[in-house]
Each structure stands twice: as C-alpha cells, then as structure tokens.
Image (tube, rainbow, N blue to C red):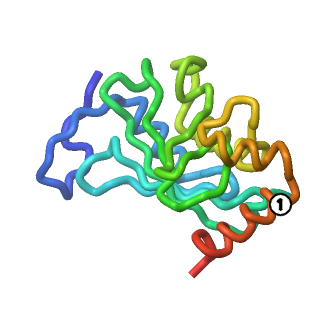
Amino acid sequence: MYIYNYNTNSSMSVPVSRRIVKEIGRLKKDSPPGISVNVDAKNIRYLMVTLEGPDGSPYHGGVFQLEMYLNEDYPMAPPKVRFLTRIYHPNIDKIGRICLDILKDKWSPALQIQSVLMSLQVLMGNPNVDDPLDEQVAAHWRSKRSDAERQAKEWTKKYASKK
C-alpha cells in the first residue's frame, strides 16, 4: 500500500510505503543514542543522518553526517548510504561509500533503517580490515594499528568535530 503526498507542506508527490513512514516515525520519536535522522522536506525517501563516533573508538567525540536514500525497492533492496563527513576508515572510501555486508549481499527485508544505522556505528568502532573498501587504509590499519588510529583521531578532530 502506498501513501501519496506524505509531506503536506510539499508540492511534490512521493509514493512511500507505510513501512517507511512507520520506521521514520519511530526513529524520530525514539532514536538510538548517538543517532539522529532528518527527513528531506521534499522527499521522505531521502534522509540526512548524524552519527556520533562510538565511545572507545578513534571517532569518539566526532559527529559524522551521512545521507541515506530508500530506493523504490526498499525494503526488498538495501538503502543507499554514504558518509558525507570525511573519515579515515578501511571500510569507507574517500567519497564516503561504505563496505558493509548488510548493505550488499547480506541484506534482508527484515532489517530496518535503525538496524543499518546501528550497524554503521558498530563498524566505526570495529573496522573490518579483512574486507576493506580502501586497501591503503586497511594496510595501514593492519601494519601499524596505533598509527592508523592516531590518523583516524586526527581526521575526526579535523572533519567531524562539533562546531
């Protein structure tokens, strides 16, 4: 079932499922710690996400901006997500693309927006150097972990510090 003109303040008509409306409503009402979501005024399928760097990680204290797009096949297909804030991480490349199995071949319609965002926070705290998107960063992480974490902290301070 589809709902049309979800945002009554918008002149655009965007078909969306009840599931998307419910998921976003739950997130706006009770989002997990360190995660906030804003819906684009013209398209409910486009979300601006803020993730706080997880405690105990080199990203702690940083605030990272992401964009998420729920394509028309959602929930049968995963959302498109990318980091807008630069981050030094083996599973995230220079243009913000993310290597995470649930965003690719391990996607399940049972997963929700919230579970994707929580998985991204976990990935930030636990990089997977065995399945990198940026091989140079992964090699740095494998060979000199403390130096790579120092670099990640520097990037967090430079690009993701609270303004």
Depth check: 53 or 46 in front? Answer: 53
> Image point 55% across, 31% down: which residue?
112
Residue 20 in the image, given as x and y percentages of width and height: 41, 35
Q: Position of residue 114 (x, y in %)?
A: 58, 40
In the image, 92 versus 46, the foreground residue is 92
Q: Is residue 40 above or below residue 161?
A: above
Which residue, as the protein is rendered here, is positioned at the far bottom?
Answer: 163
Eyeballing the image, is 129 above or below 75? Answer: below
Indicate the quadrant where residue 70 lies: top left
Q: Secondary structure at mark 1?
A: helix
In this view, the residue farthest toward the left is 11
- Left or right for 104, reference 52: left
> Disc 1 residue type?
Asp
Q: Residue 140's spot in the image, x, y percent? A: 76, 49
Name the residue rendered at 67%, 58% in the picture: 34
Q: Position of residue 135 (x, y in %)?
A: 65, 40
Who's the residue at 55% across and 60% down the image?
Answer: 86
> What residue is rendered at 56% in x and 81% in y?
163
Is the N terminus in the top left, top right, bottom left or bottom right quadrant?
top left
The residue where tag 1 is placed is: 147
